[in-house]
Image (tube, rainbow, N blue to C red):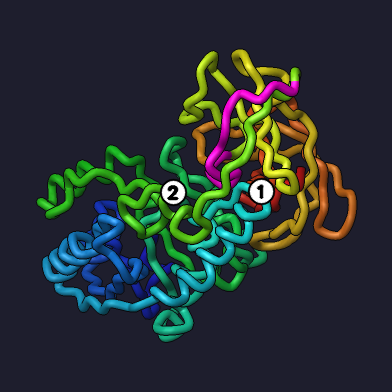
Amino acid sequence: MNMQEIENKRIAVLLSGGVDSSVVVYEFASLGLHPDCFYINIGPEESEQWDCTAEEDLEMATAVAHKYGCRLEVIDCHREYWDQVTRYTMDKVRAGYTPNPDVMCNRLIKFGAFDEKRGHDYDLIATGHYAQTETDEEGRKWLVTSPDPVKDQTDFLAQIYDWQLKKALFPIGHYVKDEVRQIAEREHLVNAHRKDSQGICFLGKINYNDYIRRYLGEQPGDVIELETGRRIGEHRGLWFHTIGQRKGMGFSGGPWFVVKKDVAQNILYVSHGYDPETAYKQDFPIHDMHWLTQAVALRDITFKIRHTPGYLPATLEPTGEGAFVVHAKDKIHGVAPGQFCVIYDAHHHRCLGSAEITV
């Protein structure tokens, strides 16, 4: 973040109550700026059932805004979240896919519903994401990875629209997490030692399976060993499992790996042994390619299919309108339909976009 980038700009900061967005406010204050801060409320109506941390989050956000002389406004996006992100999530898991609510929350809520309600009054929307941007010679803005490989969040931003990227500002994206903690400690921020949030978006301690159970309930069915056809147990619902899953199966004689779902017959197929061949794929199709800045005709790329520090080399073969086949250099464990395959350049510097896995 430099002064030229933000000079004479109206800036909104999305303040979550966590240490990252709090250090964002400090970064502005260190430049003599006091941007308007916004806390987005998306907590469920029956918060007592969910052990929601929203009240504590808001207290932290209020304290940080007050410390730096910034105005804080609470924006209620509860209905938008549950109508849009939850509907997307439940539609996907009901169909046997593996969705990513956090990815869609950025597009639909943080840079979507918020912009409709208040963000449209501002030139830039600053968040605590570990990501960066750069502008090329032709004035196009690109999403760029953070130097912290563990915390980099470009994969969670890979579905935002180009107009949202143009407004996005990531003031701590050039730091690694330890540096952000050190700043928070030095500045005596109230949440300097607060643990990073886990779970879905802003939903605090919500367990993902409880989240799904709330809306889809349970639908028991057979668990079958793929190689032998032997029934080894019963699942409570295909939507509680994802391709490549090993933990939390609860069947004897393991480890077992989820390798296939038959949605029509409500059968979960598993394979026995350690990292069975059936759990790996090297070539897989993707569709509905979403380019962040513009379509890029690259053959050699790197990619991610889950939030991990590593980037996997591959080639990208176009097969139709917005459709490609990813040819990974090595076989990949746990490729699941519905996951986002996030595409980067060969040096995993620019995040170019993402598409949904279709197999």
Q: Is residue 289 visible?
A: yes
104 lies left or right of 26: right
Q: Residue at x 35, y 45 (%)?
A: 175
Q: Nearer the viewer, residue 9 or 255?
A: 255
Instruction: Answer with left or right where residue 310 lies relative to residue 341.
Output: left
79 over 175 or under it: above or below: below
Give the class, few, some or many, for how many residues have Cα within 10 Å of label 1's Cα (few <14, many ≥20): many
Residue 225 vertical position relative to residue 28 in the rendered view, above or below = above
Q: Residue at x 45, y 47 (%)?
A: 209
Q: Which residue is mark 1?
A: 96
What is the spatial separation of the Cα atoms under label 1 and label 2, in whole angstroms?
15 Å
Task: Give x and y (percent) for residue 4.
Answer: 41, 68
Q: Position of residue 98 (x, y in %)?
A: 61, 47
Q: Residue at x 41, y 86 (%)?
A: 121
- Quadrant where the N terminus is found in the figure: bottom left
- Amino acid, disc 2: Tyr
Residue furthest to the right: 319
Residue numbers of the magenta segment: 229-241
Place residue 265 in its image quadrant.
Answer: top right
Judged from the image, the secondary structure of the residue bearing numbered disc 2 is: helix
Q: Is residue 255 magenta?
A: no
Q: Which mark is residue 238?
A: none
Q: Does residue 232 belong to the magenta stretch?
A: yes
Q: Mark 2 highlights which residue? A: 208
